[in-house]
Amino acid sequence: MASARVYAGRSAEQRRAERRNRLLAAGLDLFGGQGYRNTSIEALCTAAGVSTRAFYEEFTGREDLLLALHDQVAARAYDAMVETAAALGDVPLPERTDAILCAFVRAACTDPKAARIAFAEVLGVSPAVDQHRLQWRNRFVEFAMVEIGRAIERGEAPQRDHGLTTIALIGAVNELVVEWVVRGRTVPLETIATEAARMAYAAFTAS
Amino acid sequence: MASARVYAGRSAEQRRAERRNRLLAAGLDLFGGQGYRNTSIEALCTAAGVSTRAFYEEFTGREDLLLALHDQVAARAYDAMVETAAALGDVPLPERTDAILCAFVRAACTDPKAARIAFAEVLGVSPAVDQHRLQWRNRFVEFAMVEIGRAIERGEAPQRDHGLTTIALIGAVNELVVEWVVRGRTVPLETIATEAARMAYAAFTAS
């Protein structure tokens, strides 16, 4: 016989995970559709079919849900980049930057609503969200610095400090994704990815 | 004898201009110091020594004052760039991008509080502010496209569509200024300007 804690064939843990996923889906749809500023906790709860009390059992507030969604997109894009780099083997820098930047752009833009959240809706929310963004940026900087170290070793990039170059490059790639996601996606994603790769190669190799 | 409309030797028009300038100075100090989100209209009025009623005679609201301050910085940086370009005469592209980007960065960062407003505080405020930023960005894109056209004509840049390159470059330069202004200005401004110029030259000449 089923224990008292199992309801409709699901454990309390399962039901809670489902509830969290429904809130994440509602956040993705509303923050990414009508925008973070225009979405109340009540609207999120209605869309997810959960009570306000249940919302606060999962997230400390609207901003916490925003950060969870941002993490999903950033992690997807980061992982895609790292996995692509690891699988590349011994290819020259132009092919390497091309493959890595395309992997990043494709993963970041798989879902236009998720991209809007991660690249536009997170701006100007609070110092805590800015700090969260900065932590992610630092992970991307670290990854890029390892790639640049490799390129320098192979004689494919000049021996210099690429720290600010990497920061500038991240600004460039972000602006390209914002261009795609906020301005109606009139440019094909492949064109955005190609431009991002061109900027990366040009920046890394500039003396 | 002075007319009734002159008070303490100043006309109503002069007094009104002074009042507006005091509000602009208060906005610069508070938006650029404690941040836009943390500054109320009451705080602005107290700092400027004007009444709330007087505030609304000059600006439609806090956002309107923010846009006026953004315009000041953007116009200063744009004008510096245009004037530098016009005075350069017939120099090769590396010197040209170097001089133009340095003029832009120096003018944008003359006042760190003004830079913070124009590059960080304006983010995520409202669709109207985003639209305002986009209009300025388009002016910078237009300027850059003229420069690129000139470089292509002279055989200094490859014949291709540099539209997205220019957008990416603006993202790169903005990120560098944000790095300088938001993160405590630990990097010398000249280093930021040099990096911006390197990115511009690399982006323009990339095939």
Image (tube, coloured by chain):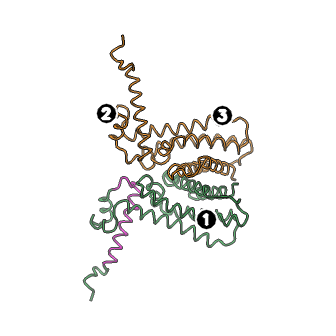
Chain colours: A orange, B green
Q: Amino acid at mark 1?
A: Ile
Q: How far apart in space, not on screen, are marks 2 and 1 (Cα)?
A: 56 Å
Queried whether the magenta region covers residue B17, the answer comes back as yes
- Tell me the SS state at disc 2: loop
Quick check: do tags 2 and 3 share a chain? yes
Q: Which circle's residue, 2 or 3, is located before the other in the chain?
A: 2
Q: Nearer the viewer, mark 2 or mark 3?
A: 2
Q: Chain of mark 1?
A: B
Q: CA distance from mark 2 to mark 3?
A: 44 Å
Position in image of residue B97 (x %, y %): 64, 63
Extent of the magenta region: B12-39
* Lateral position of residue B99 relative to residue A110, left or right: right
Task: Give residue A27's position: percent from left, percent from top.
Answer: 41, 39
Q: How far apart in space, not on screen, are marks 1 and 3 (Cα)?
A: 40 Å
Extreme residue in the left direction: B4
Same chain for the residues under marks 2 and 1 in the image: no
Q: Which residue is mark 1?
A: B100
Q: Residues within 10 Å of mark 3 (few under 14, many from 20)?
A: few
Residue B86, x across and y down, in percent: 61, 72
- What crowding class fits label 1: few (fewer than 14 Cα within 10 Å), some (14-19), or many (20 or more)? many
Mark 2, other Cα within 10 Å: few <14 / some 14–19 / many ≥20: some
Between circles 1 and 3, the one closer to the viewer is: 3
The amino acid pointed to by label 2 is Ser
Q: Is residue B143 magenta?
A: no
